[in-house]
């Protein structure tokens, strides 16, 4: 199983290309994961086949492939991690079971809220 590097919100994510904040959703449109990538379709495919154990178990239990939804486009030169964190916080309020596990995951959000 190949591993993609995990991002950290403590380091700004400023790129020279557009970055997309995306959500992975079930058939009802419920968001189960929020992420960022300059190649969201490739990243989505990686999540489905090589993502976290929680993601793979969730997908297997669905019986169908989830959907990718682009939430916003971050223009080059802007910090994508700030927007990603804001989207994670907003969707965490709706679905505390988000599958994010590092950096932007529920543990990071809970720590941020408690501080």
Image (cartoon, rainbow, N blue to C red):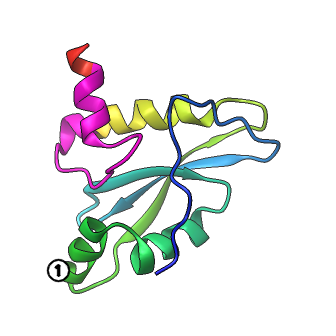
Residue appearing at x 20%, y 17% in the figure: 114
Residue 27 visible from this viewpoint: no
Element at badge 1? helix
The magenta segment is 92-112
Q: Quadrant of the C terminus?
A: top left
Q: Residues within 10 Å of mark 1 (few under 14, many from 20)?
A: few
Determine the residue located farthest toward the bottom in the rendered image: 63
Q: Nearer the viewer, residue 92 or 26?
A: 92
Residue 34 at x, y = what percent?
40, 50
Residue 84 at x, y = what percent?
48, 38
Q: In this rendering, is residue 90 above or below 20?
A: above
Residue appearing at x 58%, y 62% in the figure: 40
Residue appearing at x 32%, y 32% in the figure: 89
Residue 13 at x, y = what percent?
65, 36
Determine the residue located farthest toward the top in the rendered image: 115
Q: Nearer the viewer, residue 79 or 75?
A: 79
Residue appearing at x 35%, y 55% in the figure: 33
**Residue 50 falls inside the magenta stretch:** no
Q: In this rendering, is residue 90 above or below 2?
A: above
* Residue 70 located left or right of residue 39: left
Residue 50 visible from this viewpoint: yes
Quarter of image, res 25: bottom left
* Residue 104 located left or right of residue 107: right
How many numbered circles does the render carry? Answer: 1
Which residue position is annotated with label 1?
Answer: 61
Determine the residue located farthest toward the right in the rendered image: 16
Residue 103 at x, y = what percent?
41, 40
* Residue 52 located left or right of residue 98: right
């Amino acid at each position: 199983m190949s591993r993609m590097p995990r991002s950290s919100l403590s380091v700004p994510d400023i790129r020279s290309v557009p970055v997309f904040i995306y959500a992975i959703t079930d058939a009802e449109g419920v968001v189960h994961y929020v992420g960022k990538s300059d190649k969201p379709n490739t990243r989505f495919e990686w999540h489905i086949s090589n993502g976290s154990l929680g993601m793979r178990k969730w997908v297997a239990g669905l019986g169908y492939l989830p959907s990718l939804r682009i939430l916003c486009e971050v223009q080059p030169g802007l910090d994508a991690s700030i927007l990603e964190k804001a989207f994670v916080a907003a969707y965490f309020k709706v679905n505390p079971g988000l599958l994010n596990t590092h950096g932007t995951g529920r543990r990071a959000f809970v720590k941020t809220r408690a501080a």
